[in-house]
Amino acid sequence: MRAVLIVVSLATFGIARATVQVVAHSCSSLPLTTFSYDRALPLDLRDSAAKTQDGVEIHAISFASPRGGRATGLLFVPEQRPPGVRLPGLVMQHGMPGKAEYVSWVSGNIAHHGAIVVALDAPFARRRGDPVRFTAQDSAEQVQLIVDLQRAFDLLTGRPDVDAARMAFVGRSYGAAMGGLLAAVENRPRTYVLIVGDGGLVTHYSAPGHRGELDGLSGERRVRWLAAMRPIEPIRYIGCATGASFFFEAARRDELVTVNDALAFQRAAPKPIEVRWYDLDHNLGWPAIVDELDLAAPHLGNRPGGAPGRHVVRHEGAVPRVGYHPGRRHQRPSVLEGDQHWKV
């Protein structure tokens, strides 16, 4: 299906400006310390090389989480790296439900073009049961994920083959929403790529068509869950990000994220931003993935997914550029249908 690139504006959707509401919050009033941790703590990285595929080493990794237990995920490293050359670093976050393996083919393709990628399992992916339990555990796991994502950047910056000045975050759906929260406390990425995201779990379960589970809770349980989740809702935080640009991908026929919620999330982000709308549903296909690769290239200095030559992406506002690293032409993933991930 052909993707349609649209310059985002409220007029595009015939929506009056007043219908998209973003509640302003003072960053100083937000509990940012909730997501703090001691960076001096040992990472205790455990790394096992699982396989090599299409010129990319895939490692199963885990490290000590400052919030307890061990964070797990996958590490993707180009097999052939020029000696002494430091590569861009990227952290990838999957959607809900899901796990790191489900974004492995995207992560592998980005690594194939000259970046080192960490894909983390969300805390709900490390246990059994439903991803959302509508208890205080959801709040604790969301906080843990934000801390663990910061530790993933610690992992990357601690590698001698990673250029700490060329970092990025890519999140899809739930991962995109969490990227908005992460951006308020993690300023090492130069750009955040947020794909089909909304303002967070409270936003999602309050939207028309998705209120069933929330409305089905007892009044007391619903009140407790909202009280635990609202203070850490990502849309409250994304505007506090500093030093990074934002790239949003959204779908006009998205059955999970409403147009209003997508627009509200985008409007809450600080500039510079770029937004691309596709005439697709929530499961954006191959055209959007190519855009992810192309977007990363001018920011990180790796080879874009298209034809050879320097790739230029226009943004709203000034976006710093980095050095260009010659790489290989884009290869389509091994699996395009079905599970759509590399098997590890």
Image (cartoon, helix red, strand yellow):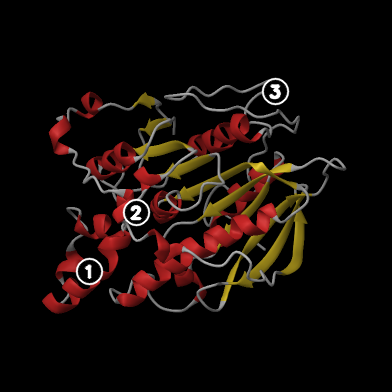
Q: Residue at x 30, y 60 (%)?
A: 201
* Rendered image quadrant of residue 60: bottom right
332 and 109: which is toward the camera: 109
Amino acid type, label 1: Ala
Residue at the spot of label 2: 234
Q: Neighbour class for label 3 at 10 Å: few (<14), some, many (≥20)?
A: few
Cα gap from disc 3 to disc 2, whole angstroms: 37 Å
Q: Can you see residue 199?
A: no
Residue at the spot of label 1: 227
Q: Is residue 186 shown above or below 212?
A: above
Q: Residue at x 50, y 51 (%)?
A: 186
Cα gap from disc 2 to disc 1, whole angstroms: 14 Å
Left or right position of 192 against 82 = left
Q: Is residue 82 shown above or below 108?
A: above
* Rendered image quadrant of residue 214: bottom left
Residue at the spot of label 3: 308
